[in-house]
Image (cartoon, rainbow, N blue to C red):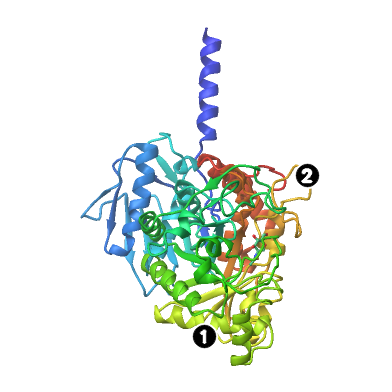
Amino acid sequence: MRYILLLWIFTFILSASTARPNSSCDTIIPKPQSSISGDTPFIITKNSRYLSDTTLATDAIRYLQKHLSIVSNYQLHQSNTDNLGSIKFHYNPKSVKKSEGYRLNISRDKIDIEARDSAGFFYATISLMQLMDSSIWGRRHSQKQWSIPACSIIDYPQYKWRGMMLDSARNFFKLSYVKKFIDRMAQHKLNRFHWHLSDDEGWRIEIKRYPLLTKIGATRGPGTKLPFSTYPTMRGPKNRVESGFYTQKEIIDIVAYAKARSIEIVPEIDMPAHAKAAVVSYPKRLLDPDDRSKFRSIQKVQNNVINPALDSSYIFLDNVISEVVRIFPFEYIHLGGDEVPSKAWSGSPAVRQLMRKHNLNNNKDIENYFFAKMDKIVSKYHRKLIGWQALINAKPKIRKDSIIMVWRSPEAANKVIKKGYNAILSPVQYLYFDQQYVRTKSEYGHTWSTPISTKKVYSYRPSKLKKVQGIQANLWSETLLDEKIADYLAWPRALALSEIAWTAQKRRDWRDFKQRVDSVGIERLREQGIHYRGAKAQP
Ligand code: TNX
């Protein structure tokens, strides 16, 4: 009996020590620019209080409170007096010089957090939470006391654009998943959620003036006007009707949800190509009735392009954009611009006439004409333009403060910058998270480019040229048949993304990163129920 009791005590001690507090402060992903470990940890209990002298810390405090109340069943209350054992949020633009930066000082008696903006306070809090046991990220009651290692951190991001794109058009994702996606980004200090909301396979955003966009354009499969869920690159289930879109009300909610996590949402309405869902919904407005062209896109979709010679196309797009900017407050809007099939418009009398009138010689000229007009519309709504690389082919006429997303190669950014534009780097060879991790039949993901392991993502050294706004990973969804596959392809690669976007190159080291991923990074993903790809040796 005594023996059994001893064994029981021993097992108890062992299991308690696996839920150990982190003893070092080197567990944060992405790695801070500077961090020094101290001696005695700070303990959060239900008696801990916070103090704040700024409303800029409000979202950060709420976030910490929300997690604590899930896992510990208590709120962190506010205190008016500066007692020992408080967490202090202090606005200090003098000591924190960089936007989104923060200082975090943890000692036995108090925690000091300083920042100059709400993102800085939020990221300090994220770091604080990463220093706690991983169960802080969980969704069940776990523990009452939280030990946080003593630590002194000075931190700021090296890029201001740290993005991830989710394609809700090829396969629709429920709102609940979009929220999870955004939350997980925020937990790794990613700050731009690029939302691909329209493509050939579906129009996913409610536009009040044009209800058919979602009535017709958000449904595909047998018996619909978009019966091509079986074309070669779509590996979806055949003969099934699929549909889905987000209402404006839902989107307003998501924008606020993201904002509270220091994330801006960039909506993308893809044009003039990748627009089959739009053109089948409103053919009279968007297509030349006399157009005799017959062509297929690279993804084998027939006649998927808006006609750029019709006044009705621009009126339509202007109206659409007027509704988009009403619900998306971010200063940029993404208008796609990729992959116009070479034979598009070849049989359109309206386009032929347009070419004569404006002295346009080829499709590139026509696309530039189209985007010059679209840029004017975007500027009318006080927004700036983002587009894929093709936007600056030949002689672009869009404003110089536009941003070009460069995806064909890492080097292609130079061309963009030479032409005087800003760039976001998203090279397919490193940051297309829809590609397989390794080339094996059993792996999820696309195979048309190179496979991308987490290590490969981590090895990317993005250019530091001034016009480079930052980097972004893209999760196109042709092969993402469910949320689990989306999770698998995104994680743990997104951990590497967060570090190359945030941490200076001289602080980055694969072995050090991998050690943090293996010890706690993966544990945090597991706590959240992410279906990550779990090969430990090669995350
Ligand atoms: C290229 S990159 C595309 C997308 C596809 C993706 C699949 C770009 C601007 N266009 O339409 O979904 O490849 O990997």
- Residue shown at 44%/59% (left/top)? 123
In this rendered view, identify the residue nearer to me: 297 or 328: 297
Please tell me whether residue 403 is drawn above or below residue 122 in the rendered image.
Answer: below
Q: Is residue 239 left or right of residue 75?
A: right
Residue 486, percent from left and from top: 59, 48
Residue 65, percent from left and from top: 34, 47
* Amino acid type, callout 1: Arg
Give the secondary structure at mark 1: loop
In this rendered view, identify the residue nearer to me: 148 or 460: 460
Label 1 beta carbon less than 8 Å to ligand 1:
no
Residue 332, percent from left and from top: 46, 73
Residue lying furthest left:
80
Label 2 beta carbon less than 8 Å to ligand 1:
no
**Dividing the image into four equal quarters, which quarter contains ligand 1?**
bottom right
Crowding at dot 2, Cα within 10 Å, few <14 / some 14-19 / many 20+, comes out as few
Mark 2 vs 1: CB contact within 8 A = no
* Amino acid type, callout 2: Lys
Residue 30 makes an appearance in the image: no
Give the secondary structure at mark 2: loop
Residue indicated by mark 2: 441
Task: Estimate the spatial distance between the alpha carbons at disc 2 and disc 1, rounded to whole Å.
Answer: 45 Å
Residue indicated by mark 1: 399
In this rendered view, identify the residue nearer to me: 233 or 491: 233
Residue 518, percent from left and from top: 63, 45
